[in-house]
Image (tube, grey):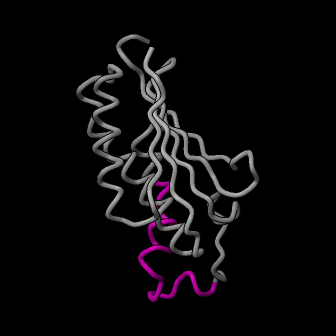
Amino acid sequence: MMATVRLAFSPAPVHVRTARLVGVAVARRAGVAEELLDEVRLAIGEACARAVALHRQYGVFAPVQVEMSDEDSYTVRVIDRAPIEAGLGIPSIPPDELANESLSDDELTTGVGFALLAGFVDDLQVRPVDEGVGTEVRMAWPTHAA
């Protein structure tokens, strides 16, 4: 059994690539099928980009946390510290402004993140973090050992 790999990075888009690279390397080591590695890369990138965008949109300077393990399957948890209602997809923007084309890149990223993740990952859960601030995106893929 592999120990859990943990990353914490400042909420800057430049660090998302690093999280993707580490995530795919850990997935490969955990025994995720080669044909699923692109899906893993895209999903980790999207989940991390979503967390970074939420942090930036709400002025949260705490690090984005990523945990990867292969206990029963290859599981990745991406944890943000944005307000729970924002992380769960409840719009903070009035509905009449949602049609406005002046939405920021961060607002657009957080808005489409769930739809993209659902397309990449069969085993996807999004839930509030136990401490009451932030959300956890949990994604899992089967491994050869499973």
Quarter in which the C terminus is drawn:
top left
Q: Is residue 10 magenta?
A: no
Q: Name the spot of residue 52 as percent of width and height, x first.
A: 47, 63
Q: Main secondary structure of the magenta part?
A: helix
| Direction top: furthest residue | 145
Q: Name the spot of residue 29 as percent of width and height, x first.
A: 30, 23
- Nearest to the observer: residue 26 or residue 146: 26
Q: Which residues are magenta?
A: 96-115
Q: Name the spot of residue 75 as percent of width and height, x first.
A: 48, 31
Task: Give left or right: position of 120 versus 35.
Answer: right
Q: Residue at x 32, y 40 (%)?
A: 22
Above or below: residue 137 compared with residue 16: above
Numbered marks: total: 0
Q: Residue at x 46, y 34 (%)?
A: 68
Above or below: residue 31 compared with residue 94: above
Q: Residue at x 51, y 19 (%)?
A: 71
